[in-house]
Image (cartoon, rainbow, N blue to C red):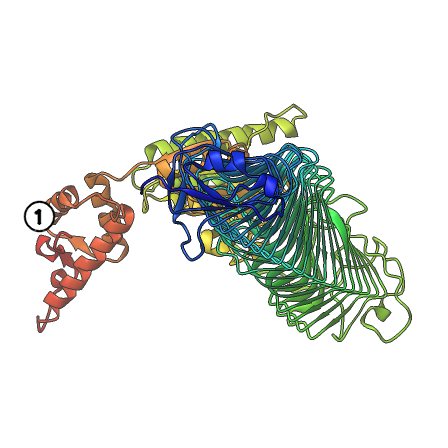
Amino acid sequence: MAQGTVQVTHTGTSRWRRRTGEYASLAAALEAAAEGDVLTVAPGTYRENLVVQRSVTLRGPEGSPGSVRIAPLDGVPLTVRASAIVQDLHVEGQDSAAPALLVEDGAPELTDLRIVTRSASGIEVRGGARPTVRRCTVDNPAGIGIAVLDGGGGVFEECEVVSAGQAGVAVRAGGHPRLERCRIHHASGVGLSATGENSSLEAVGCEVYETRGSGVQITARATAHLTDCDVHRTTADGVTLDTDAVLTLADCRIHDIPENAVDLRSRSVLTLTRTTVRQFGRNGLSVWDPGTRVDANQCEIFDSTGDYPAVWVSDGATVVLDSCRVHDVPDALFVLDRGSRADVVDSDISQVRNTAVSVSDGATAQLDDCRIRDAATGAWFRDHGSGGTLNNCTVDATQTGVIVTKGADPTIERCTVDAPAEAGFYVSAGGRGTFQGCRVTGSGGYGFHVIDGCRTTLKKCRTERCARGGYEFADAGPDAGPGTGPVVEDCTSDESGLKQPTAHETAVETASRSTSVLGAIPGQRTAEREPPVTAPDPEKESRTSRAVLGELDGLVGLDSVKREVRSLIDMIEVGRRRQQAGLKAASVKRHLVFTGSPGTGKTTVARLYGEILASLGVLEKGHLVEVSRVDLVGEHIGSTAIRTQEAFDKARGGVLFIDEAYALSPEDSGRDFGKEAIDTLVKLMEDHRDAVVVIVAGYTAEMERFLSVNPGVASRFSRTITFSDYNPEELLRIVEQQAEEHEYRLAEGASEGLTKYFTAIPKGAAFGNGRTARQTFEAMVERHASRVAQVEEPSTDDLTLLYAEDLPELP
């Protein structure tokens, strides 16, 4: 487009200052123009660096938007230093060190400008400038869309940043703009950014989306207020606050965020009112550090697309949720670390796949008048120093209502748990807690399940229609000291009787003399009370250690395993004799790791090991309880702890054998519940070290990884015993033993055929070792039966001899 001409029209009445006419350049027209003059720019491309220093009107021709291009080769294309009116211009810049439109002073009106540039910033407002910018668009893939700094301000109405190489809108060094009904999108950096003391940003009815950085970022003592705004489809977090930032969100919508919807740290403060947070990949609210605080009122957080808690509070931060809803999330509220706190009032938490409220590492949570519904676990107070209060809350349709473990000590008052699948309230592993005026109805398990002799207090509680019983106080075991066990006062149930604590517990009953379930308990129980009469277990014939070792020696192969077991048994036996002689005995850890392929005799050796320890008096029973991941890991956090505890209790006095133990800690574990089983098991092994021997077993490489990623587990085991694969000769001996046991014989040539068969059989992952030998024998018996069934009067040899042709085909 050719260079145009400029018409300047003077609107005043003075004939001394007539300037109506045409000028060859914009610069000349601006030089000639006086205050109030109107400069109508003819269509064309102007390679000029314009500076507007008077309150004039600079505009393109009516009816031809975009026909006037201000496009110098370098520098700032358009600078405004007065309260001018600039409209209907197309501004292009090429200088990466300068803005395309610079507003330095006055209160100009900038309307219907299109800025297409590759500059440091599309529009830059600084100093005392207070522009009103309407319906302007900025396309700047090289730098910032709109920059407001050095005390600049102004109002941006219905503007759009269609692309930015850095931030869409950046406010710093005391800038304070107001954005109304603006759209900021396709920024390579942050959508809206405010940083630095005295910097502030106000946005009303705006939309921020398709940004590679955070949608909104407020840092370093800056403040911002967003009302009726949408932040969505960002690559990074939706909203980020850091270092004493202050942000208020009212009637906003934050959604479709792959990371944290809102993340704030370092003493930042966020206030949310009537705001929705949905479809986030990590946390809906992620709150960190002492002094950091979120106050949310009438907000909704829901529809997580990831596997993280909706609200995460840690490192001493505080969150207040008032009249809020959290639903359709993996976990609702996690509060971690000493000093961290969550206060939840009159709020609804529902449709939670795992835990609604989790409190750990010394944190505190207080819930008042809240409703928890359709969660795996309602609330879990996890460990020492963790606590808080649940007051007048209802927990409906969960697997477990409230869990208290590992020294946590919450206060639960006037709370109701309705229809839990497993337990209303579950306390284990040294958990404490005070339950006052609480009620459990329709439990699929127990109402109150307190194990390990936990020092829990129950006052004026009530259970109704609990399938397994209203109250269960499991034995703390022989290691329990005095002063353990629950304290129960004035509790009732619709059952005919209450299962009372065992002699190891100190359940102090101060129930009233009513017809309630506890009315039959007059007062404090004494140690002299006779234990309940139970039917004795049938006696199992015990064998001497020599007899059991003889069976071990009779197993095919396993020479190195036999040596390891004998060595360990010798250590234990000598230690026992030294103790009997009044001498110090070396501490021998009896827990073992068995590594090797399937079918190498690991379960058999574990059974014999337990029986040997029982014959030596080291274990009470020596029985074997075999479990795997499916027996220990539940579908949610609470049930995993319960399942692991129950498996351990079944093995008390014997051996707990965990096959394929590495499955509890998969390589891509993420939030896998197997870790909970491991943590529970390690705690039980420590608390009941003499009651159960634990053997973990699995493939060699996988077990090495399992022990390396779980050092707490590795430290509990004394040694690893490797079970080698059987060679063909040993597999033949297993078949021979099977044949002898079932009254068969190998015909001439059958042994050679079996050796060749076991040599040729593939030794891949499906190879079962001893199991393969037994399966081969069974296949030979089947083929033998098919053959002999055709003989009318078979002889004894016909009925007993197995031939080489009875071997199955190689797989």
Q: Circle 1 sits on which residue?
A: 749
Query: Where does the image place residue 174, in percent across and percent down from the top left?
Result: 67, 34
Q: Is residue 504 visible?
A: no
Q: Residue at x 59, y 56 (%)?
A: 229
Give the side of residue 139 with respect to residue 300, left or right. left
Q: Is residue 211 above or below residue 427?
A: above
Q: Is residue 45 visible?
A: yes
Task: Decide which of 805, 120 is in the foreground and name it.
Answer: 120
Query: Where does the image place residue 778, in percent across and percent down from the top left?
Result: 22, 58
The residue most toward the top is 583
Query: Where does the image place residue 381, in percent across and percent down from the top left?
Result: 69, 50
Task: Decide which of 59, 658 is in the foreground and name it.
Answer: 59
Give the side of residue 423 with respect to residue 547, left or right. right
Task: Decide which of 546, 154 is in the foreground and name it.
Answer: 154
Query: Where does the image place residue 137, in percent across and percent down from the top left?
Result: 47, 49
Q: Residue at x 56, y 30 (%)?
A: 588
Q: Is residue 467 above or below residue 698?
A: below
Q: Residue at x 80, y 71 (%)?
A: 517
Count of numbered labels shown in the rendering: 1
Q: Quadrant of residue 450?
A: bottom right
- Mark 1, Cα crowd under 10 Å, few <14 / some 14-19 / many 20+, is few
The image quadrant where one finds the N terminus is top left
Q: Quadrant of residue 417?
A: bottom right
Q: Amino acid at mark 1?
A: Gly
